[in-house]
């Protein structure tokens, strides 16, 4: 039993959904490794400061930079699985075409917002990037002068992947509305609290597969 509420089949939409999922899963895995690495870095910093009097050089700078990795790389994966916080009190009571229309409109709004964010964050990156500089950077961190443009580039990249995911979900909810589908593919389905808790428990127990 899979913990995902997203159904699959052999349609073009579902194949595209799974293709994008493969990229999202890889980026989500990278985010997990980065979190683990930051935990090790924090331990090394504390132990080094306490027993050797030598903290990790630029600890705050490294932590600040890599926070962008796990804060943004998992955005699209979380959207695919329906993991973002949302208010289901009203939407959860809807059924059929009315539900799919509401979901479609919410995804359309998210596409417009994400498009604006991509535009803004890309120019924020451009202001930080400089081809004529040694580190291709116009700005850097305070302590050890790490270039800031990689973290700033990561934001529009992650948002662009989210943008693609949102278009797939817009397609999925639109298709569900037209067909009046009961359980459409390539979109997260609303589940009650008991179902969610059961799936989370199975995942923790290692029964997910």
Image: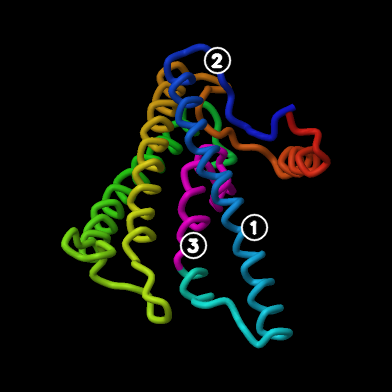
Q: Is residue 112 left or right of residue 46?
A: left
Where is residue 169? Give x, y as percent. Answer: 43, 32
Residue 193 falls in image quadrant: top right
Distance of mark 2 from mark 1, alpha carbons? 35 Å
Q: Is residue 159 left or right of residue 194?
A: left
Q: Nearer the viewer, residue 72 or 168?
A: 72
Asked if residue 130 is positioned above or below residue 164 in the image, the reply reads below
- Identify the residue position indicated by label 1 in the image: 36
Q: Is residue 46 left or right of residue 69?
A: right
**Tag 3 or tag 2, which sits nearer the N-term?**
2
- Identify the residue position indicated by label 3 in the image: 66
Q: Nearer the viewer, residue 177 or 201?
A: 201
Magenta stretch, main secondary structure class:
helix
Q: Residues within 10 Å of mark 1 (few under 14, many from 20)?
A: few
Instruction: Name the image quarter holding the N terminus.
Output: top right
**Tag 3 or tag 1, which sits nearer the N-term?**
1
Q: Nearer the viewer, mark 2 or mark 1?
A: 1
Asked if residue 137 is positioned above or below residue 118 in the image, the reply reads below
Where is residue 186? Give x, y as percent. Answer: 50, 26
- Identify the residue position indicated by label 2 in the image: 9
Magenta residues span 65-90
Q: Residues within 10 Å of mark 3 (few under 14, many from 20)?
A: some
Mark 2, secondary structure of its residue: loop
Mark 1, secondary structure of its residue: helix
Q: Name the residue located 59 percent from the left edge and 39 percent from the top edge.
A: 93
Q: Name the residue located 42 percent from the left edge and 81 percent from the top edge.
A: 143
């Amino acid at each position: 039993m899979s913990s995902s509420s997203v159904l699959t089949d052999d349609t073009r939409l579902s194949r595209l959904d799974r293709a994008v999922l493969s990229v999202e899963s890889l980026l989500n895995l990278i985010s997990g490794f980065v979190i683990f690495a930051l935990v090790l870095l924090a331990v090394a910093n504390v132990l080094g400061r306490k027993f050797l009097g030598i903290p990790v050089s630029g600890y705050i700078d490294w932590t600040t930079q890599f926070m962008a990795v796990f804060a943004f790389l998992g955005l699209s994966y979380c959207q695919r699985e329906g993991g973002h916080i949302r208010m289901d009190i009203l939407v959860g009571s809807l059924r059929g075409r009315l539900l799919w229309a509401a979901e479609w409109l919410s995804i359309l709004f998210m596409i417009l917002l994400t498009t604006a964010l991509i535009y803004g964050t890309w120019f924020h990156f451009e202001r930080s990037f400089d081809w004529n500089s040694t580190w291709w950077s116009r700005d850097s961190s305070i302590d050890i002068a790490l270039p800031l443009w990689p973290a700033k580039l990561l934001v529009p990249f992650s948002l662009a992947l989210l943008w693609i995911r949102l278009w797939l979900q817009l397609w999925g909810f639109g298709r569900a509305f037209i067909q009046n589908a009961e359980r459409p593919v390539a979109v997260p389905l609303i589940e009650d609290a008991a179902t969610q808790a059961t799936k989370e428990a199975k995942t923790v127990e290692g029964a997910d597969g």
